[in-house]
Amino acid sequence: MQSFLKILRWTVGILFIFSGLIKANDPLGLSYKMQEFFDVLGLSFFSDYTLIFSILMNVLEIVTGIALLIQYPYKKTLWLLLALILFFTFLTGYALFSGKIKTCGCFGDCIPLTPQTSFIKDIVLLISIVILLFYHKKIKTKIKPWLGIIILTLTSFGVVYGQYYVLNHLPLIDCLPYKTGNDINEKMKTPPGAVPDSVAIQMEFTKNGKSYFFDANHFPDNFDESYIYKNRREVVVRKGNGLKAAIDDFTLETINKVDSTKDVLSQTTPYVLIFTGKVTNEVPWDMLMSALHKKHKLVYIVTADKSGALQYLSKENILIGDITMIKTAARVWPTIFIMNGSVIMQKQSYIDFLNK
């Protein structure tokens, strides 16, 4: 029995540590996933705090995993792990049974899991933690309390600092499709055998306080101006096989809304793409652009913030991109891409570029 409990304890502890470390490598990615959950659950007012939640969640996962391995404080750690796994099981269960969330983000972008796999994993962990809690009296803590406190304190500070570092210098391990060496054109190709979801467009109308949904071919005979258009949505009619291009939202437009994606990616000489969701005076743009222009003849600003770009960077080559694409490509705003055609030759945060 002791051997079984030891194996169970180490398995649970290592899984929590591994999960926390993977997400601590990219806390901003986890915060985006939290925003997605909050939006679906109707809790959008929490969206401004998701980065704080993300950092704390990663610290909690890693510290509780370490605490379980050193068995200090053992019973309290098990109760905390039980609370965590119940929360995670609710989220993965909601993602699975509602169908509104495609991935739970349990292991970040490095190891994407389907909602079904995530839910099964959490059920197994839940059962394991319950077993450990039921037999907790059979385990005797050997570590000195003062040593346990030192280990957990140092771990907490280490995880916080590590996340602070990657938030300023990009993730240590880039698991996203825009990592160095990748060819954006290749990543935009649909993989062989891919079967996309079959979707239908439904339009929402309101009449006398009630909502009605119609597709383009099925409007009611009594449809008139009393139906007020409200919104449109995509409804999945038939599920595909889940295979799709790694990059499916990469578009670059000029200020005048001319699609320049193909022209930019087909440049025959090296050039620079600077990705930033917003353009504000918090970034030393004059210094950054001056340093870039000394080394590169062609520099583009890719942003979703047209007004900010025109205010601070009106003399630069401005391209407008989708905010979700920019969030994926650049975890630090701004992030500098040295490009050769459609291949990403180098990628670094503006802080690293200015300090090198």
Image (cartoon, rainbow, N blue to C red):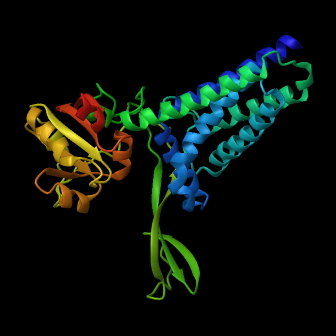
Does 20 appear above or below 255? above
Residue at horizontal 17 percent and vertical 43 percent from the top: 287
Q: Is residue 178 left or right of residue 78?
A: left
Q: Position of residue 248 (x, y in %)?
A: 35, 43
| Camera-side residue of 289 and 99 | 289
Q: Position of residue 322 (x, y in %)?
A: 32, 52
Residue 344 occupies which quadrant of the picture?
Answer: top left
Q: Is residue 310 left or right of residue 10?
A: left
Examine the rendering and report whether any part of residue 328 can be seen.
yes
Q: Quadrant of the N terminus?
A: top right
Q: Is residue 12 left or right of residue 265?
A: right
Does 329 appear above or below 230? above
| Camera-side residue of 322 and 302 | 302
Q: Residue furthest top?
A: 3
Residue at horizontal 17 percent and vertical 59 percent from the top: 255
| Camera-side residue of 89 and 315 | 315
Residue at horizontal 19 percent and vertical 41 percent from the top: 288
Does 37 appear above or below 76? below
User: How many labels sit on residues?
Assistant: 0
Q: Quadrant of the C terminus?
A: top left
Q: Is residue 321 left or right of residue 121?
A: left
Q: Position of residue 137 (x, y in %)?
A: 92, 24
Does 72 appear above or below 95? above
Examine the rendering and report whether any part of residue 109 can be seen.
no
Residue at horizontal 28 percent and vertical 57 percent from the top: 305
Q: Position of residue 252 (x, y in %)?
A: 23, 49
Residue 208 occupies which quadrant of the picture?
Answer: bottom right
